[in-house]
Amino acid sequence: MAALLLAVLLAGCLAPGPAAPASGVAGASASRSAASNDRDPRSGLPVVAASALPRQAQQTLEAIRRGGPFPYSQDGAVFGNFERILPSRPRGHYREYTVRTPGESDRGARRIIAGADGERYWTADHYASFRVVREDR
């Protein structure tokens, strides 16, 4: 009987608890900005304010506005949207730009995707998820 009680108690200790909340794509500040569950009406994707993005992402957005220069030869290349997370558009509509990641020896996982219509998307996990970037007014 004691062995059965011990097994039940141990099973309860080992059972998975509630899932931990996913970390914010752009970090804590972006999580706070999206706390209202603000979603883009066209794409259905979460929205993040440009000012809530990491400083390096804000610098990349500014470089896109200026038309460069960009630190990587791949910047400005066509983004194929193979993940089909972004709204479907003709090939060439989307371009990708690297967002530097401190401490990374390569391009890292962070990108800004720029659409030909002026829309901007942020991914911190190499296209696994996206947020629509809302410019601060």
Image (cartoon, grey):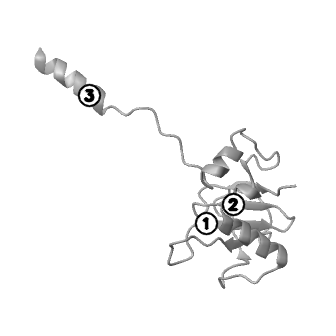
State the residue in front, 41 or 36.
36
State the residue in front, 58 or 107.
58
How far apart are the two marked residues, 2 and 1, measured between alpha carbons? 8 Å
Note whether 73 is above or below 107 in the view shown: below
Q: Position of residue 2 (x, y in %)?
A: 12, 17
How far apart are the two marked residues, 2 and 3, measured between alpha carbons? 41 Å
How far apart are the two marked residues, 1 and 3, measured between alpha carbons? 40 Å
- The kind of secondary structure element at disc 3 is helix
Disc with the residue nearer the chain's start (2 vs 1): 1
How packed mark 1 is, by other alpha carbons closer than 10 Å (few <14, some 14-19, many 20 or more), is: many
Q: Say which amino acid is labelled 1.
A: Arg
Residue linked to disc 2:
122
Q: Say which amino acid is labelled 3.
A: Ala
Q: Residue at (55%, 48%) from the top-left corner?
A: 23
User: Could you tell me if the residues under marks 1 and 3 are in contact, i.e. CB atoms within 8 Å?
Assistant: no
Disc with the residue nearer the chain's start (2 vs 3): 3
Residue linked to disc 3:
11
Residue linked to disc 1:
110
Q: Position of residue 111 (x, y in %)?
A: 65, 67
Q: Residue 134's quadrant in the figure?
A: bottom right
- Left or right, 58 with reference to 104: right
- Left or right, 95 with reference to 107: right
- The kind of secondary structure element at disc 1 is loop
- Left or right, 19 with reference to 5: right
Q: Position of residue 45 (x, y in %)?
A: 72, 48
Residue 69 seen anywhere in this rendered image of the structure: yes
Q: Position of residue 20 (x, y in %)?
A: 48, 39
Q: Say which amino acid is labelled 2.
A: Trp
